[in-house]
Image (cartoon, rainbow, N blue to C red):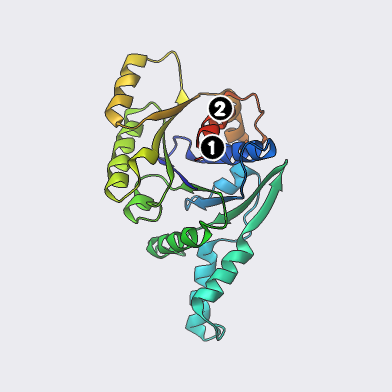
Amino acid sequence: MLIVITGKGGVGKTMVSALLVKAITKLKENKDIEGEILAVDADPASNFASALGIKAMGSVGDIREDMRKKMDNGTFPQMDKEMYFDGKVFEITAECCIRNINFEFIEMGRPEGYECYCALNDMLKKILKKMENAYKFIVVDCEAGLEHISRRTTTKADIMFIVTDTSNAGFRTVGKIRDMAERFGVKKEGIFLVLNKFNENLDNENLKEKIKISKIPEICRIPYEEEIAEFNLTGKPLTEISEDSKAYIAILEITRKIGHL
């Protein structure tokens, strides 16, 4: 199952991604669901590893740059380039066990200098295609905005969580992502709205109207939580969040909903 987390910058995509990995492993531990987990950091900002409490072993961007340099100076091995690339991706796929949270991890990274991300996005598409049968759950933390949709790297998603806060800008981005995702083939029934940083004291009628206009079913509301804010401030891994955290409980509930799909 390919699960893609997207949305505007700053709305909490990486938090949702990290707690989703934690929730899946919790349900596996309880024998509620089965299957291996792969976490993929597809955001050039590369914050997913620290949110999970791990360190990346390298990135796909590093592999690409190394291959290009070897080809330029004539030191590339006498072997198929795709086979070489696949072997290097295997080398940087980290096997992680953090506080009984077991998963594997790949970081896409970024190109050198001012190059665009087209080549890395193409590589991401190929990696996801090759990995889809090896893992029951692939959780992809996307970069902000529309890049992965427009490049069609994640349009094969089984589940797409579009994360937003309650801001107008967040909901505008939701609409743009929804339109582009549906146009490029993401299954409409697999697209869900995750409302983050929810404050119950806000004007709920206004919020209901925003959700209605978004035309996306709301799957959960994650309340604003001081513990999350403190973790983000100090850089403490979100996988260490207490199991009575309201944010974690909300993610656990949606994981139960999708776990048997």
Residue nearest the observer in this picture, 166 or 24? 24
Q: Is residue 24 left or right of residue 187?
A: right
Do the residues under discs 1 and 2 have CB atoms within 8 angstroms? yes
The answer to whether any part of residue 235 appears in the image is no
Quadrant housing residue 211: top left
Residue at 71% from the left image edge and 48% from the top image edge: 97
Cα separation, mark 1 vs mark 2, equals: 9 Å
Residue at 51% from the left image edge and 56% from the top image edge: 132
**In x, y percent, where is residue 216?**
34, 32
**In x, y percent, where is residue 6?**
42, 42
Task: Indicate the amino acid at tag 2.
Answer: Ala
Q: Secondary structure at mark 2?
A: helix
Residue nearest the observer in this picture, 197 or 232? 197
How many numbered circles does the render carry? Answer: 2
The answer to whether any part of residue 13 appears in the image is yes
43 over 235 or under it: above or below = below
Q: Is residue 259 left or right of residue 121?
A: right
Most extreme residue toward the right, as rendered? 99
Residue nearest the observer in this picture, 253 or 42? 253
Residue at 65% from the left image edge and 36% from the top image edge: 26
Tag shown at residue 247: 2
Quadrant housing residue 145: top left
Task: Quickly name the residue at label 1.
Answer: 15
**In x, y percent, where is residue 170?**
36, 33
